[in-house]
Amino acid sequence: MSFKKQYLKSKPICKVTFKLSKHEAQHAKSVRLLGDFNQWDTSALPMKKLKDGGFTTTLDLPKDSQYQFRYLLDDRVWENDWDADTYVPSPMSLEENSVISV
């Protein structure tokens, strides 16, 4: 799991590309990226599946903010991004949420 941050000079936006390898996605058929940026909407569009079996998506996030997020594999298994900037306890379970700072 990884993500790449690209700050725009012309706007207060950071383009963040999230990627999961096939192994990290645990051979899922679909993966959704859910978090503060989409109100944890489980009907959010799935990430794009790559030819190698991995998944990717790019979001434009307002900078100078932090966002909690997790991946939802096959609409049933939650997974953190272990390369996240930090982690915080989830208010919904005993697990932690990944956090990205932009």
Image (cartoon, helix red, strand yellow):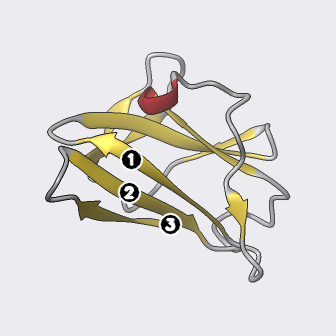
Disc 1 and disc 2 in contact, CB within 8 angstroms: yes
**In this rendering, would 66 be left or right of 16?**
left
In the rendering, at what x and y percent does residue 18 appear? 49, 60
In the rendering, at what x and y percent does residue 40 appear? 56, 25
Q: Residues within 10 Å of mark 2 (few under 14, many from 20)?
A: some
Q: Which residue bears the numbered disc 1?
A: 60
Q: Residue at x 43, y 31 (%)?
A: 37
CA separation in Å, label 3 and label 2: 13 Å
- Mark 3 and mark 2 lie on one chain; the one further toward the N terminus is 3
- Mark 3 and mark 1 lie on one chain; the one further toward the N terminus is 3
Q: Residue at x 45, y 62 (%)?
A: 17
- Mark 1 and mark 2 lie on one chain; the one further toward the N terminus is 2
CA separation in Å, label 3 and label 1: 19 Å
Q: Secondary structure at mark 2?
A: strand
Q: Which residue bears the numbered disc 3?
A: 1
Q: Residue at x 20, y 35 (%)?
A: 65
CA separation in Å, label 1 and label 2: 6 Å
Q: Which residue bears the numbered disc 2?
A: 16
